[in-house]
Image (cartoon, grey):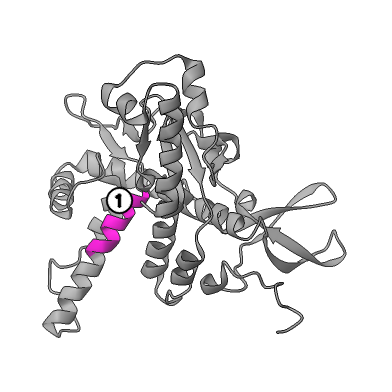
Amino acid sequence: MGNNKKESLDKLKKLEEEKAKSFEEQKNQEVEETEEDKSNHYDVIDGFRKLEKSSMPFEGKFYPASWEFYYRSPTTKEVANFSTIDEQNQPAIVKAVTSLIKKCFVIVDTEKNKEVSSEQINDGERLFFFLKIREYYLNDKPISYNVINEEAGGVITVDFVADSLIFPEVKPQLLERFDGRTFTFDYKGAVDGDQIKFLIPTLKTTTRILNYIETIHKKVQDRGQNKLKKGDFNKQLLVFAPFLYEHGNESMEILRKKFSDLQKNEAKFKALNTIINKFNLTNTETIKYYVNGSQEETLMKFPGGWKNMFVDDTEFDNLF
């Protein structure tokens, strides 16, 4: 945990001590409190903004109701580190974005009075959380670029922020199969009431899979070979891997065993394959904007690239 985050949480602890109940005491003893007490614990964290559920993708329905989200602005050093990424290396970009989100976000479970690892943020919402951090750092300055809009009569400037992202509509029936962290599906041909159950893909599980891929590639490089050996890299396993986690800390060996067992159950294998192909809880490639009160859509763009995500291109524009 970064120093800023630690300092902010320490202030929360002091607040609790003033009420004669320290944060640690409540966490360890699982003290029951009134709803009024709970609501007052995490209202304000110095230097952190509270992320309202109503502004989150899917209105925060794919998280436990008791979770509250807070975030701080990244430090200049953290931004400088982010700016060193290789824009041609997509896994490196994903890992850098994930690292910054984990450092800047705090999740508090208000029922259990404890912090939840920010690795539990849903993978499909990664860009939204990243843009919120960027906006905080740049004093809510949007990403701006020009588009052609016939209704407006020509070229207009689009302001792209986290709230501009478009997420798919979710059917109530899907939410009924979700308990706050895991999905559970019945499937045709199930024996003895067997079900398909998996953890919603998170930053943590995606990072584990990326680390596995990097390890395999390093092995190949260490061998001095240009080709992977049979069994090194199973593309089908990697497609299914995000949906084989139930706890989020399973090793790739365990996932490989689960995948092998799954392949032996044709009905279940077919059903999960269908779910994977239909499962979509991430933003589209387009964003929304408004012209004369009417909502329009246009392709998402990052004119300055990832390296310049935290650069204010209007600062010093009279010099450069």
Residue 319 colored magenta? no
- How many numbered dots are placed on residues in this image? 1
Which element carries disc 1, helix, strand or loop?
A: helix
| Depth order, front residue of 167/52 | 52
Quadrant of the snapshot with the C terminus: bottom right
Question: Looking at the picture, how far across and down is residue 97, in whole percent?
Answer: 44, 61
For label 1, the crowd category at 10 Å Cα-Cα, with few meaning under 14, some 14 to 19 and many 20 or more, is many
Q: Which residue is painted at 36% across and 30% down in the image?
A: 23
The residue indicated by pointer 1 is 205
Work out whether 64 lies above or below 291.
Answer: above
Mainly helix, strand or loop, the magenta region? Answer: helix
Residue 209, quarter of picture? bottom left
* Left or right of residue 154, residue 315 in this image: left
Question: Looking at the picture, how far across and down is residue 17, in whole percent?
Answer: 40, 27
Question: From this viewpoint, is residue 283 visible?
Answer: no
**Type of amino acid under label 1:** Thr
Q: Which residue is painted at 13% across and 74% down in the image?
A: 229
Work out whether 189 lies above or below 206.
Answer: above
Work out whether 255 lies above or below 172.
Answer: below
Question: From this viewpoint, is residue 263 visible?
Answer: yes
Q: Which residue is painted at 64% across and 55% down in the image?
A: 161
Residue 13, quarter of picture? top left
Tell me which segment is drawn in magenta: 202-212
* Left or right of residue 156, residue 255 in this image: left
Question: Looking at the picture, how far across and down is residue 172, in whole percent?
Answer: 50, 29
Q: Which residue is painted at 73% across and 61% down in the image?
A: 158
| Depth order, front residue of 22/194 | 22
Question: Looking at the picture, how far across and down is residue 114, in whole percent?
Answer: 36, 32
